[in-house]
Image (cartoon, helix red, strand yellow):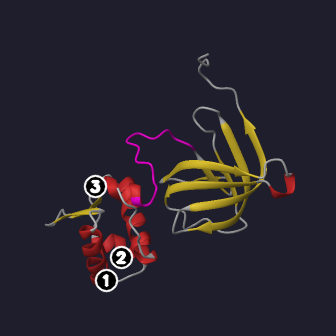
């Protein structure tokens, strides 16, 4: 399949559809999308027509209707679609963050303590996270890795938060390891 080029507006709306669909587990109303992205409902309806034409969303008419992302939407945004993802907790300034799924943790410059960074790719609501906030992510399901650091930047379009790492640790797994 050929890569789909999306405008920043289309990408933001599509990511919002995916986030809301993941959170609500049902079709997403245009009004809910409009509230999340700060646009008028009529503008969202127009934008959704182009996303439907690209086969990135399905539209369902009626009072219980709305929009639902297609598998192509996840591919276009390079998001892994997982039916039952493992829980990886996220704590923001010590408080648990709900409605967030951690897709991946990428480490950079681990050999240089002053430049050690982690990119945390998430699905869900990251709007309340700001630069300078303390974030703890983990433990991850297999390696039991927990990463703690200060938010350096947040890319809302791709839901990536970059942390200046202050600490990493692993905890012993509760189940025996397979060798």
Q: Are marks 2 and 1 in contact (CB under 8 Å)?
A: yes
Q: How far is disc 2 from disc 1 in space, using C-alphas?
A: 8 Å
Magenta run includes residue 158? no
Percent position of residue 10, x then y = 39, 73
- Say which residue appears at 73% left-offset and 50% top-offset: 148
Residue 51 higher or lower than 78, as above or below = below
- Name the residue beneath numbered marker 1: 43
- Name the residue beneath numbered marker 2: 34
Count the labels in the image: 3
Residue 43 higher or lower than 23, as above or below = below
- Say which residue appears at 50% left-offset and 61% top-offset: 125
Which label was assigned to residue 144? none
- Name the residue beneath numbered marker 3: 26
4 and 161: which one is in front?
4
Quick one: quadrant of the C terminus? top right
**Residue 3: which quarter of the image?**
bottom left
């Amino acid at each position: 399949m050929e890569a789909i080029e999306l405008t920043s507006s289309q990408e933001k709306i599509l990511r919002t559809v995916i986030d809301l669909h993941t959170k609500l587990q049902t079709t997403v109303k245009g009004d809910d999308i409009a509230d999340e992205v700060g646009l008028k409902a009529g503008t969202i309806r127009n934008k959704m027509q182009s996303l439907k034409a690209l086969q990135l969303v399905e539209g369902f008419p009626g009072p219980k209707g709305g929009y639902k992302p297609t598998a192509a939407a996840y591919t276009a945004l390079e998001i892994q679609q997982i039916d039952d993802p493992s829980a990886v907790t996220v704590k923001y300034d010590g408080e648990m963050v709900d409605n967030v799924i951690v897709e991946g943790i990428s480490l950079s410059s681990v050999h240089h303590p002053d430049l050690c960074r982690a990119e945390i790719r998430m699905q869900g609501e990251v709007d309340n996270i700001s630069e300078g906030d303390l974030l703890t992510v983990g433990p991850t399901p297999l390696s039991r890795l927990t990463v703690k650091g200060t938010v350096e930047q947040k890319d809302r379009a791709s839901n990536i938060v970059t942390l200046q790492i202050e600490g990493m640790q692993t905890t012993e797994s509760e189940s025996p390891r397979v060798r």
